[in-house]
Amino acid sequence: MTSPAEPSAGVGGQQPRKRPMLLAVTACPTGIAHTYMAAEKLQQAAERLGVDIKVETQGSIGAENVLSDNDVRRADGVIIAADKDVDRSRFAGKRVLSVGVAEGISRPEHLIEQVRSAPVQGTGDPGAQAAADGGGGDGGAPRTAGGSGGRERSVVYKALMNGVSYMIPFVVVGGLLIAVSLSLGGHTDPKGGLVIPDGSFWMHVNQIGVIGFTLMVPILSGYIAYAVGDRPALVPGMIGGWIANTGELYDSEAGAGFIGAIVTGFLAGYLVRGIKRVKVPKFVQPIMPIIVIPILATSALGLFFIYVIGKPISWVFEHLTDWLSGMTGTSAILLGAILGLMIAFDMGGPVNKTAFLFGAGLIATGNQTVMGMCAAAIPVMPLGQGLATLLRKRLYTDQERETGLAALFMGLFGISEGAIPFAAARPAQVIPANMLGGAVAGAVAGLASVEDAVPHGGPIVAVLGAVGGVPMFFVAVAAGTVVTALATVSLVDLSERKRRGGAALGEAGGVAVAAAVPTAAPPAPPASAASAASAASAPSAASAASAPPADAAPAGVEAPRERGPESPWAAAAAASDAPAEVPEVLSGYLTEQTVKVRLDAGDKEAAIREMAELLARTGKVADVAELVRTALAREAQGTTGLGEEIAIPHAKTDAVTAPVVGFARSAEGIEWGSLDGTKARLIFMISVPEAAAGDEHLRILALLSRKLMDTGFRERLVAAGDEAAVLEVLREVG
């Protein structure tokens, strides 16, 4: 018997055309909703297009539906929809298309079509690409980010984020230890800025913090290199970062800072990838990754930086100092703006150090106004970036928001490096915003003739009495901070809108392309409420019209994912008629008692309060007010609006005694801050006790996220007339 999804035998007894087999991996940094939403969308699109697909999800509860070696051998192509690193070495010799996880949600049909012409994952075999192209290739393709045309997170972006994620703990720990030691153990000294007595307890705390800061730059460089060139690139990346940050090695008074670390990280990563491509005898291959590649790459990169890159850095440092010396008699506003720009540019690099040392050197001559300009600009970057994470929380990840709080604290103590994680992650947006704010702070301080008697900056020096013109000093810092924060959120928001806008524009085209490609007919959809959604899709509608009537589903029965003829609709109908226990919804956590067909609330806070009261009907909520507070605190970290008119607020709190889930509908919709701009009409609220929070809420989120990507399911949920009907639809979740 021939599967309805496959064409019957053609003229001359030809065998039925084999259905294409694709693999996919979905993953996002948090590994919760979007991972599973992308997986579900890809599976639905594959079913419509007559393609078999197996999707591995790399979520917070671990990898699920893991792809086996046998799966890879049979696959015609691989789609990676992820915003974090995914190991591609297992897909060697296969066509691999890599895009951001949002692409897997917004235009899955386009990805399925596009993977057919994606580059082949590098294998070291020069004939791999040619074979995949039917002999017409031009050699093996290098390890690549994926096919062209998809809006993917590039190798550069992922490598930067990898380095930043490992660097952040060093910035936070080092910065906070230094700040605490200065505030509790330091005092002002005209000869040495803020001084901590030698041998004291706070000096030892300060030294531990300095070690954290010292390691920060090599860590950034090393893990950028690791993301590009894998494990053999880690050592050359870290050593290269150390060299970049140690100016004495190339006759510079200042190291290259975090910008130098980014340069050495990418140089190390791509250098290692280049060395890997060199053919070596088999007996040498085992020692290549642990001896040969690290030694060659480290030596080459280190010497290259010292003799080639380091010299220009030293030259820049020297000539910037001479240039600033010639400007001391010019307009104080202009000089302050220039010093602020320089202080904010590289935060510890040669340009920053040039401005700082220039101001510090003039203190001994009796000119304290130049250092006053620098002191006002120094805290602006961390304070501005920290403020930005509070102003527009949805633009930042949980980790970035936590780093923002630490940056605010570091800014108070004049530790400009607190802003480095933001600058490294989004240099094109953050560095210009920092420079604009630094220029404003420096110019205001210059206009007001603010003075600083110690070579240090930030509010701490004013509190300790080292600043002359304290009110205007704080005005300058506040003005620069606000300008930095507003410029940052504007630029980051603009960048995100452009990225999302490109994805939205591509979706319609992707569907059209997929519809035009001749594929095997998908299985017939059920003649239920889901058909209304399917009718909107040209391929699905056409397939439904031509499907054999014998395969039609009975009304009200949802179609299973059918791969062949062994899943008759009669079995599903018989199962639905057979006497059996009524299945629970989400392990019994969601009951008719926690369903409300019409939500009265008109805003997010009121909706969460109303949902909490709904959950309290079960007797499992010990403290409604605390549940509301916890859920709102979670919203403050980032919206739980998933788009597609869905929101899933959730809370981990001992205000509930057992896991409980509620559902409510909003007829008008509630503004929830969803990235796609839709108002939330279908709202689930999940609450679990702290002791049960580990995997349970993630499992519930995963189940809901998958099922809510089914358009027909959402339509049935909207159409259900009362609580009992809603619960009947929700039984499909499991």
Image (spheres, helix red, strand yellow):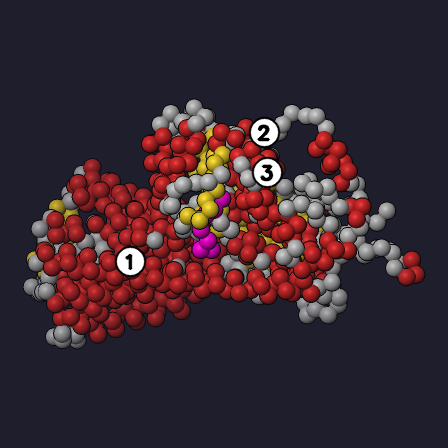
Residue that numbered label 2 is attached to:
584
Query: Which element carries disc 2, helix, strand or loop?
Result: loop
Q: Nearer the viewer, mark 1 or mark 3?
A: 3
Give how far across and how far down residue 92 sits, in percent: 66, 55
* Residue at image location 13% in from the left, 71% down from the top: 332
Of residue 346 and residue 713, the one placed in the foreground of this image is 713
First-in-chain label (1 vs 3): 1
Label 1 SS: helix
Please report the bounds of the magenta region as a residue range: 675-682
**Image quarter in which the C terminus is found:** top right
Image check: 549 left or right of 249? Answer: right
Residue 1 drawn at (x, y percent): 86, 47
Give above or below for 17 relative to 32.
Answer: below
Coordinates of residue 677 in the picture (x, y in percent): 44, 55
Q: Which residue is mark 3?
A: 729
Regarding residue 237, the answer to whether it shows in the image is: no
- Mark drawn on residue 485: 1
Residue 565 in the image: above or below residue 316: above
Query: Magenta stretch containing residue 376, yes or no?
Result: no
Residue 239 lies left or right of residue 390; in this view the side is: right
Density class for disc 3 (Cα within 10 Å; few <14, some 14-19, many ≥20) is: many
Q: Are marks 3 and 2 in contact (CB under 8 Å)?
A: no
Kind of residue at disc 3: Val
Q: Which of these two is toward me, 299 or 450? A: 450
* Mark closest to the chain's N terminus, 3 or 2: 2
